[in-house]
Amino acid sequence: MRIAAVADLHYTPQTYDKIREQMLRVRDDADVLVLAGDLTNYGRVAEMDSLLTMLVRLRIPIVAVLGNHDFESGQQDELMRLMSAEGIKVLDGTGYERDGVGFAGTKGFPGGFGRGMLTAFGEPEVKAFVQTSIGEGLKLERAMAQLRTERRVVVVHYAPIGETVKGEPLEIYPYLGNSRLAEVVDRQGANLVLHGHAHHGSPDGKTTGGVPVHNVALSILKASGVSTPYRLFDV
Ligand SMILES: [Fe+2]
Ligand SMILES: [Fe+2]
């Protein structure tokens, strides 16, 4: 299976004008399009409506997770409903199998990497924050455990490893993702992990267990010289 992947479209009709022509050819290049979150800028229904009008024209199966921007207006449930109604597989702690390849996904959450990971200690607000991070890890674990396929692709918005956020200011690393997601990936096993969110991060990395991780934020694809508004992967 050939997968085309991109994250952080932050869709507006104006920005999309620049990539429209190339995007229309995605169907010739890939079997499935993966959108790894931040589809919209402010998570408004009007933005999603406009984006969906464009996405259905691509006539390619689409697998997606939401990003933090898609939560900004508190309309995330409605956005997911609209996407599902157009046949898009929105992964929210869920799995999806297609042509022998399993997709598992969730949004993820901040929390930090490795020894810098925030722990549930002290104030209730800190504990609630960490609990949300742990909860997203559990959602991913549940989604991956559902899959019965040998080949597996994980889709998250937040970064599961620090390697693919390199390039961002060190001070904001903890807000860009958390290692619990990678621990789940290594426990469950996967062929490929796709994420976004770190617009100025690095394209390629690996989990401790050796699973390839790629940051497919649109800005990174542009910076790394990929000639299409998506990057292709074979699984
Ligand atoms: Fe983004
Ligand atoms: Fe984001």
Image (tube, grey):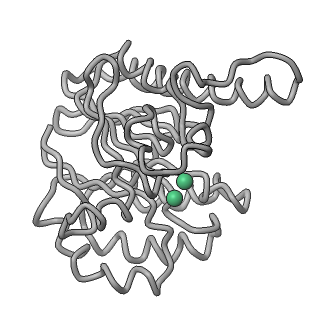
Residue at 25%, 61% (x, y): give it: 224
Tell me: residue 191, above or below residue 81: above
Residue 166 placement (x, y as % from top left): 42, 44
Residue 195 placement (x, y as % from top left): 40, 44
Residue 145 placement (x, y as % from top left): 40, 17
Tell me: residue 44, above or below residue 32: below
From the viewer's perspective, is 202 left or right of 65?
A: left
Tell me: residue 130, above or below residue 228: above
From the viewer's perspective, is 119 left or right of 210?
A: right
Residue at 32%, 52% (x, y): give it: 34
Outermost residue, right side = 123
Residue at 46%, 39% (x, y): give it: 159
For this rendering, which residue is in front, 178 or 191?
A: 178
Residue at 34%, 57% (x, y): give it: 6
| Residue 26 location, quadrant | bottom left
Residue 103 placement (x, y as % from top left): 32, 36
Outermost residue, top side = 187
For this rendering, which residue is in front, 141 or 223?
A: 223
Q: How many marks?
A: 0
Identify the image quadrant of the C terminus: top left
Tell me: residue 187, above or below residue 93: above
From the viewer's perspective, is 8 left or right of 81?
A: left
Identify the image quadrant of the N terminus: top left
